[in-house]
């Protein structure tokens, strides 16, 4: 919340065309080919997945008859737009397309790209009856299977940020060898599979209280609903900050923010665009699941309490999603300056528990959690190294 408040404060600039475009229109606006795909899951949610089939100069890779696929999945409160926030020479979706890849941008249910269901309308509580496990088990899994089917490929490269890594950790923990082989390299930015430290207000509730709340929500007694910062708030601040007379307050806010939050990496003139597409929406139930993840220091399915666990999972405890099961090649990008998932979380939870799947990890200086998506240094320090790593993989093992 604090970070968000600062973000709002530093929003100082007038409306740009990019603020009004959705992801696919933005891609077209910058002169890239774009396709909209719709993937319907087994449990009835339809989400839009955007594709940039090739870059502006139509580059191909030596020795590859088809462009290798790179699939991106966004974080909590974000959408695929998080890979498009900066200029084409900086944003990962464009940078990867121009490097010769077939880029696919996934979206989960409940965001503005995932509001359709075969039976439920977003105004009904049952529409919001999901957590990150459902993102992982349905949206992520089926969007990846769809992408492979459409492109006629056997495997793809995956890039996730924050919750976009969590859903892949959860998926791979459950997946058999055949499914794991669909992921050639899993690049995890700000990787999140559990937390060591208490993080207010997420860890404020007692375990029992948390479980009671979850049961109330499941019973439809309260709170199955979207969790969302009203757009009216963000847009009011955008307008306020555009004012000739008041914008000095925003400039002051920016200076405070860059000191406190090390936001030096963010291009201030992109902030109105970022705020027009972030934060997006999730469910109350997902926030409660996140609170459990903070408490349990590991990934589990939603803990419903002993009785309901027996009914839902056939065991008293919520099943653990064991990242020790992961065999897909995984590469981590993290930073001790990440306020959400810091170096300790990554070392003590992910690196300690992962098996031979973990092949490399990069501890970066001065990356906040959001910098992995919007920081200007991310292009040279994260995205381009990933591209060279993929080129190396293709050279060694073929397309
Ligand atoms: C989603 O539902 C709306 C209204 O029912 C409809 O107009 C729209 O075409 C649907 N979109 C997809 C992708 O199915
Ligand atoms: C939510 O889903 C669970 C099963 O996953 C079901 O038992 C419960 O009735 C659902 N609640 C609502 C309000 O749809
Ligand atoms: C993952 O590991 C657990 C043990 O920690 C095991 O019970 C489970 O069957 C494994 N799952 C897969 C898909 O291998
Ligand atoms: C910041 O974004 C603006 C356009 O919104 C662009 O003109 C400028 O070059 C960008 N600055 C950097 C350092 O990338």
Image (cartoon, grey):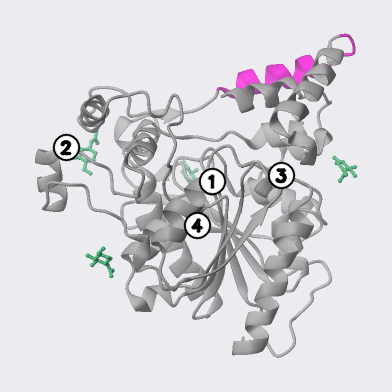
Q: Give the Cα separation between the discs numbered 2 and 1.
A: 27 Å
Q: Earlier in the sequence, mark 4 or mark 3?
A: 4
Q: Secondary structure at mark 3?
A: loop
Region rendered in magenta: 230-245
Q: Which residue is mark 1?
A: 75
Contact between marks 3 and 2 (CB within 8 A): the answer is no
Contact between marks 2 and 1 (CB within 8 A): the answer is no
Residue at the far top in the pictured view: 245
Give residue 274's quadrant in the image: top right
Q: Earlier in the sequence, mark 1 or mark 3?
A: 1
Q: Which residue is mark 3?
A: 366
Q: Which residue is mark 4?
A: 38
Residue located 73% across and 34% down the image: 262
Question: Secondary structure of the magenta portion, mostly?
Answer: helix
Q: Residues within 10 Å of mark 3 (few under 14, many from 20)?
A: some
Ligand 1: does it lie within 8 Å of the C-beta at label 4?
yes
Q: Give the Cα separation between the discs numbered 3 and 2.
A: 40 Å
Horizontal relation, residue 213 to residue 350: left or right: left
Q: Give the Cα separation between the discs numbered 2 and 4.
A: 35 Å
Residue located 15% across and 48% down the image: 312
Horizontal relation, residue 171 to residue 164: left or right: left
Q: Which residue is mark 2?
A: 305
């Amino acid at each position: 919340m604090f970070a968000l408040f600062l973000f709002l404060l530093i929003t100082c600039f007038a409306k740009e065309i990019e603020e009004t475009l959705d992801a696919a229109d933005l891609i077209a606006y910058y002169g890239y080919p774009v396709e909209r795909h719709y993937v319907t899951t087994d449990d009835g949610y339809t989400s839009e997945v955007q594709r940039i089939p090739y870059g502006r100069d139509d580059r191909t890779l030596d020795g590859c008859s088809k462009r290798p696929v790179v699939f991106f999945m966004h974080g909590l409160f974000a959408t695929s737009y998080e890979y498009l926030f900066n200029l084409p020479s900086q944003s990962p979706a464009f940078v990867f397309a121009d490097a010769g890849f077939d880029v696919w941008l996934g979206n989960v249910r409940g965001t503005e790209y995932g509001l359709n269901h075969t039976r439920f309308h977003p105004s009904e509580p049952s529409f919001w009856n999901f957590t990150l496990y459902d993102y992982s088990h349905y949206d992520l899994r089926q969007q990846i299977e769809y992408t492979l089917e459409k492109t006629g490929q056997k495997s793809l490269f995956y890039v996730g940020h924050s919750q976009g890594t969590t859903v892949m950790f959860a998926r791979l923990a459950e997946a058999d060898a055949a499914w794991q082989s669909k992921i050639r390299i899993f690049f995890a930015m700000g990787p999140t599979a559990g937390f060591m430290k208490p993080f207010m207000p997420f860890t404020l509730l007692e375990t029992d209280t948390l479980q009671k709340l979850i049961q109330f929500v499941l019973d439809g007694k309260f709170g199955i609903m979207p969790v969302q910062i009203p757009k009216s708030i963000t847009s009011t601040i955008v307008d306020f900050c555009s004012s000739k007379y008041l914008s000095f307050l925003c400039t002051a806010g920016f200076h405070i923010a860059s000191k406190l939050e090390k936001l030096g990496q963010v291009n201030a003139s992109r902030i109105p665009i970022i705020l027009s597409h972030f934060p997006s929406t999730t469910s109350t139930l997902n926030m409660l699941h996140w609170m459990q993840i903070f408490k349990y220091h590991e990934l589990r399915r939603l803990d419903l309490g002993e009785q309901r666990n027996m009914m839902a999972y056939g065991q008293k405890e919520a099943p653990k999603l064991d990242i020790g099961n992961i065999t897909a090649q995984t590469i981590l990008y993290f930073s001790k300056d990440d306020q959400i998932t810091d170096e300790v979380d990554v070392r003590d939870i992910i690196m300690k528990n992962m098996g031979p799947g973990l092949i490399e990890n990069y501890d970066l200086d001065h990356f906040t959690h959001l910098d992995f998506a919007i920081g200007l240094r991310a292009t040279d320090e994260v995205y381009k190294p990933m591209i060279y790593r993929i080129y190396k993989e293709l050279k060694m093992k073929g397309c």
